[in-house]
Amino acid sequence: MLEIIDLHKRYGEVVALDGCTFQVKPGRMMGFLGPNGAGKTTTMRAVFGLVRPDSGEVRWNGQPITHETRMRFGYMPEQRGLYPKMKAHDQLTYMGKIHGMSTRDASAAADRWLETLGLADRRDAPTETLSHGNQQRVQLAAALVHDPDLMVLDEPLSGLDPIGVDTMAEILRGQAREGKAVVFSSHQLDLVEDLCDDVAIINEGKIVAVGNVAQLKAAAPIRHLELEMEGSADSVLSLLDGVRSAEVVDGRHVLTIDADTDVRQVLAEAEKGGVVRHFVYTTPSLTDLFREAVA
Amino acid sequence: MSWWRAVWLVAQRELRERGRSKSYLFSTVFIVILLGGAFVVPALLQGGATTYQIGLVGEGGEDIVATAEAIALEEAGDDEPDEFETVAFDDLESAEAALENDDVDVVLVDGTELVTGPGGAFGGSAIESLLQRAAGTRRVQELVESGEEAAEVVRILTTDPLQMRRTAGADEEDEAVRGVVAFAGLVLMYAAILMYGSWMLSGVTEEKTNRVIEVLLSTLRPWHILGGKLIGIGLLGLAQLVVVVAAGLGAIDITNAVEIPAVPFDSVVALIGWFILGFLLYAILYGAAGSLVSRMEDAQNAVGPLTIVALVGYLFSFAALNDPDGTVAMVGTYIPFSAPYVAPIRLAIGDINALEMTAAVLITMVTIALLVRLAGRVYAGGLLRFGGRVKWREAYRSAE
């Protein structure tokens, strides 16, 4: 288990981390969310010793992290992170070797990953000649080639087409199923919602929400309500307490209401008034949680 | 993973990727061609007609020159033949004086001895061998006319060539060779430091630009990477230098432009040793400078001061070439940034003693050891600070 414990980091006047704490558990996939400049990259770099926090620490299985521990970590930095002129296969082999693999094992693993990612025919192509999506695939393979126990990926989905996103998601899910701890940052909240077991939301250097996605949603103070019916819904909706916002989109009422508002009465009234074409009562989306958390 | 494996992995990558890159191969070939051209082109140009000035002392020389003229005419075919002018001298002394002033190319004494000037001017060997052949031909004609036995003819021909002698003494000749070695070594050293230094610079900046450095640093320590780069690039540089020097000597040999002297062994050892020291000294600093910038475009600015230091060291050594035991040369021996240029020169043509040489080596090595720590720390600090150009002091402070 990766434990990030009360990290603080300042760059002059700028506070980058201000008490960042969360855990990433083996076999689970965590989405690490936050607005730009919230401290995501700084936190990830701290895991790899690339940033030395002013206070706080990072632990792996209860122990402080050393160079030896990091041999078992995989890291995909935000931008590139590859040698442009090096051949894809050579590049992956090198990454494997600097993580302690023998040349033979590293070369075999490199070929395996190129095959898995559909890049076997581009094995000897210099990285710079690959398309953006394929470079990103190679970069993912570079983080995976040594079969790490923990994967930390900074914006792995950005700039990928839907097929690329599927491939990436598939592989990350597979890693989590194998018992690896996976954490990645992203701005694509709908994807994170589908993909992740847990999320941590960081804002201004502090974790403002963390936990299981379903539980977080259930614990949220708001709910979504959508209603579409024959005739006017105004009288029905006027029965509701705790309406936070309401709008009408194409004749459909979309409301944000307090979580403890009882909507059964509304549904009953609506059915009395006419045919109900559409009625949805749900927990908020991750996007809503995010907006709420960083507001 | 042991530290030496980590360092070697980095070095190995440099050797492979850089070693088989087109730019490495091209730069090697280019320097070889350049160096070869410097010798081959003049030799080819000299293939045209040349007028030789031949000094004569005593009797018997005229016949040899006339024969040489006939041979040259025959060999020239449709080309314009070489011409021969003779200058008669009353005594050997005045002839040798003319030889040293380059008024004549060679001096024939009594038709039996051939005297050449110091060193080997371009084309010197061509006239020498021509006159030898002319003398031999004359001898055969004389023998045939006198009706000697064939066996006697062969005996005389094989045992009795023109006696060869140079005006300069053996020591002076060695001195001249040493001067050439010192100068060629100096130019190569300066070119090598600038070129391999810039490889360090661009190699380090490239990793930072591409953020590969973030992945590397998650398992390797900064000094593994810096050390591996130094070894990899150093070995490639050394290999290129060896190829270039070998090609240069080969070009001289093929074209016979100058006689290949026995290059003084101590000079070559000193050059290689000082190349390694000089490379390390400067390359560490180039590497540190490379860590301070995030974009290739800024890299040249970051090394500006360093390039000036290298240039000043180089200029120091010209003073040493002129006056190898003067004050400037003495001082330059003990300044680590000029020592790699000055010390080999002083060994080749000056009067440096073992104690001075040892002191210079030690001072430079201590400086390198200090730089490994200081520049290594700047490198470690600079690597992860992206954006604008990082100041040396700032980078030093930000590292632990």
Image (cartoon, grey):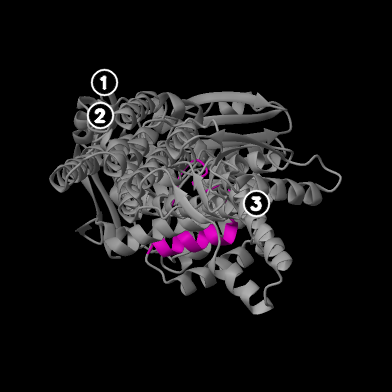
Q: Are marks 2 and 1 in contact (CB under 8 Å)?
A: yes
Front: mark 1 or 3:
3
Residue B178 position in % (x across, y down): 37, 44
> Vertical placement of B21 versus B102: above or below?
below
Circle 2: is it few (<14), some (14-19), or many (20+) Cα within 10 Å?
some
Q: Quadrant of the C terminus of chain B?
A: top left
Q: Secondary structure at mark 1?
A: loop
Circle 1: is it few (<14), some (14-19), or many (20+) Cα within 10 Å?
few
Residue at label 3?
A: B130
B13 lies left or right of A67? right
Depth order, front residue of B295/B324: B324
- Which subunit holds the residue at mark 2? A
| Res A151 quadrant in image | bottom left
- Which subunit holds the residue at mark 1? A
Residue range in magenta is A75-99
Residue at label 2?
A: A10
